[in-house]
Amino acid sequence: MRLRPIIILFSVIILVGFLAYQIEFAFPATPNINNTYTPLTQTAPQEIGSYDVLGYAIDQDQAATLLQTDEGREQLSPQNGAVAVTEKLLKRGRDAFYSETFGDEIFQTEVVGALDGPINLVTMIDILSVL
């Protein structure tokens, strides 16, 4: 009779372990632009066809005027730090924003010591049990 609770506990532990092993962690996909606050907020100062020259926005009309002269084309060249704002560039930026980790996992594991440092599952359970 004492063996029955041990077998049940052992079976539950194996079942939970198996289910935890099957869980796959993944980052969510980039949401549709209509499902974000972007359409509701003020648009960025740059638009498709404009340029960014070392952080200074040049709107589409100014860029069209500058591209008509050799001096303007030189000013809007990549060698001078100019980046043309295109649909592809905006898509790459959205994808990076929603899918890249920006190195935060390194801070959490190496600097803070989460998981294998002073902050691990045992210490978290101890702290939460006091609450």
Image (cartoon, helix red, strand yellow):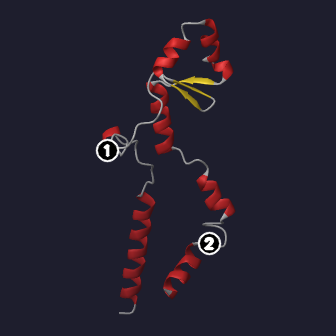
Residue 117 x/y as whole percent: 67, 69
Residue 68 x/y as whole percent: 54, 7
* Dot 2 amino acid type: Ile
| Residue annotated with mark 1 | 35
| 119 left or right, relative to 125 | right
* Residue drawn where x is 37% and y is 42% of the image: 38
* Residue drawn where x is 58% and y is 47% of the image: 102
Question: Residue 23 shows which numbered tag?
Answer: none
Q: Quadrant of residue 25?
A: bottom left
Q: Give the Cα separation between the discs numbered 1 and 2.
A: 36 Å
Residue 85 x/y as whole percent: 50, 25
Label located before the other in sequence (1 or 2): 1
Residue 21 x/y as whole percent: 45, 60
Q: Secondary structure at mark 1?
A: helix
Instruction: Tell which of 53 and 29 is nearer to you.
Output: 53
Q: Quadrant of residue 113?
A: bottom right
Q: Classify 10 Å Cα crowding around label 1: few (below 14), some (14-19), many (20 and above).
A: few
Instruction: Tell which of 107 and 58 is nearer to you.
Output: 58
Nearer mark to the viewer, of 1 and 2: 1
* Dot 1 amino acid type: Asn
| Residue annotated with mark 2 | 119
Q: Quadrant of residue 104?
A: bottom right
Relative to 81, say whether 4 is above or below.
below
* Residue drawn where x is 46% and y is 20% of the image: 60
Relative to 87, say whether 111 is above or below.
below
